[in-house]
Amino acid sequence: MPRELPQDHFCPWCEEAEELRERMTSLESKMAALERRVFGKKTEKLPPVVGELRGAEDSAARAESAKKKRQERATRKAEEAPAREIRHAVPAQERHCPACGSGDLKPLGKGRTSVLYEYVPARFEKQVHVQEVLACACGRGVVTAPPPARVVGRGEYGPGFFSHVVTSKCADAMPLHRLAQRVERSGVPMSSSTLTDLFHQAASMLLPLSTHLLQVIAAADVVWADETPVRVLDVKKTRQGYLWTFLTQTPQGEWLLGYRFSLGRASATPKSVLGGTRGALVVDAYTGYNAVTLPEGRVRVGCWAHVRRRFFDALATAPEAREALDFILALYRVEALARDAGVVRTEAHRELRQQQSLPVLARLRDWLEEQTPRHPPKGPLGQALSYARKQWDALTRFASDVRLPLDNNRSEAALRKAALGRKNFLVVGHEAAGENLAGLYALVATCEANQLNPETYLADVLLRVQTHPHSRIGELLPHEWRRRRAADPPESPLQPSP
């Protein structure tokens, strides 16, 4: 029978065995995560919260609801699509009655109508503008018609061309050398260097707008923020740069998205954008945001999506992590109830969180304290537990303020276009190019977030921004521009401000 060791016994072999177990657990978790990512089915990846919340609903009802939404969207799009009426006449050889042979036929109603969607190839055109010049009989006076509006003085490309270049790269993630090939196919001689120049000229002209947009976001009470890496060309190699996003929502429900480029991930960028401002900042646990939250700054709000992701990764080696996922899902279920009831950001929403979310948080806190001593600190579940406990204050602030969300998913979604562009055009040429890309990303992304066509917006604003008073530059931001556009009759487009 083995002899029991005293409680104060110290054994180096036992300590080494414990460290080895922790290391093995960590390696097993990493291997499971890697296998799931590389070889696993799509369903083995982290399931979205919306999907899990709907899992308990009736599948037939869910399918019917989805079908209804698709039909409503298709109807709305069909009404918005440009239409052209094409009339088909009865051929001359058939203009007689099939019963009596008479040729005295009259129209019957408005005819039969059917809809056919067809693709009309887009085209670029060379416009030759001829300005009329009138001379007086006295021989001393000459009057010339005004020239066409140009983005650049004596430039050869119109505002629509500029807006198409910017939208193609920022909204569609199309590399400019591919766009140059498409323009060439349309019959216009073009090179990628010319498109690059046009892209940077547009960014320079719209810089006052993108700068003001970031200032408006920084002044908001609640701001979301995140960052993603991008590669920047350097001498014989590339270096790491970062694209940061800062966004907020107006009281009218409009989303404003701003971007900032930097060559490093230090706290200098959040400080330059949000330094000296007050309110709430919704971010992950990255310490680079401490410069604007400590000691006196914005209130930091944590992200439950990041917590959920860590517990999901720990499932492979610690099945008890499922309990944490169930607690987190219960928090999202409360938010779904508020959305379904139409009480988001109201006093009823706050009461719902107080009555249902707070008890869930209390049970989750007890579970965290209970599980922490049972798992190695360096193991997957141990790290997930530590992450949640260290972020607890930031994670629970949403319960008392209905303006605060549960997660930072909005800012992560705002970087998806940048991630797609990173795959397509691979690198940013230099720091100034990254700054220009960030400024144009902001305007295009804000247009798309508010269901506004960025090509239409940019083509108009590129002409206006040159003469618009700087003190009223906010009138040209996408959400304000849309309001003013909606207030004007469609047949009388807005004229540039004096």
Image: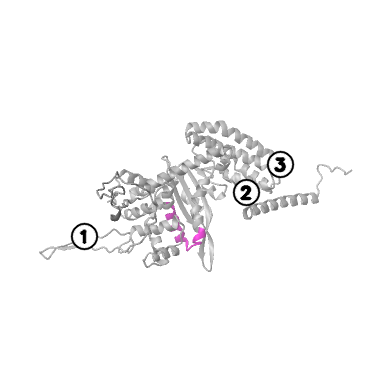
What type of secondary structure mainly makes up the magenta span?
helix
Spatial distance from mark 3 to mark 1, Cα to Cα? 83 Å
The percent coordinates of residue 354 (x first, y second) are 55, 32
Answer whether residue 136 is magenta in the image. no
Instruction: Answer left or right for 182 relative to 399.
Output: left
Q: Which residues are magenta?
A: 422-442
Q: Amino acid at mark 3?
A: Pro
Spatial distance from mark 2 to mark 3, Cα to Cα? 29 Å
- Contact, CB < 8 Å: mark 3 with mark 1? no
Can residue 276 be seen?
no
Q: Quadrant of the N terminus?
A: top right
The percent coordinates of residue 97 (x first, y second) are 29, 49
**Location of mark 3 (residue):** 373
**Location of mark 1 (residue):** 145
**Location of mark 2 (residue):** 44
Q: Amino acid at mark 1?
A: Ala
The percent coordinates of residue 317 (x first, y second) are 69, 47
User: Could you say which is closer to the camera, residue 72 or residue 320?
Assistant: 72
Spatial distance from mark 1 to mark 2, Cα to Cα? 67 Å
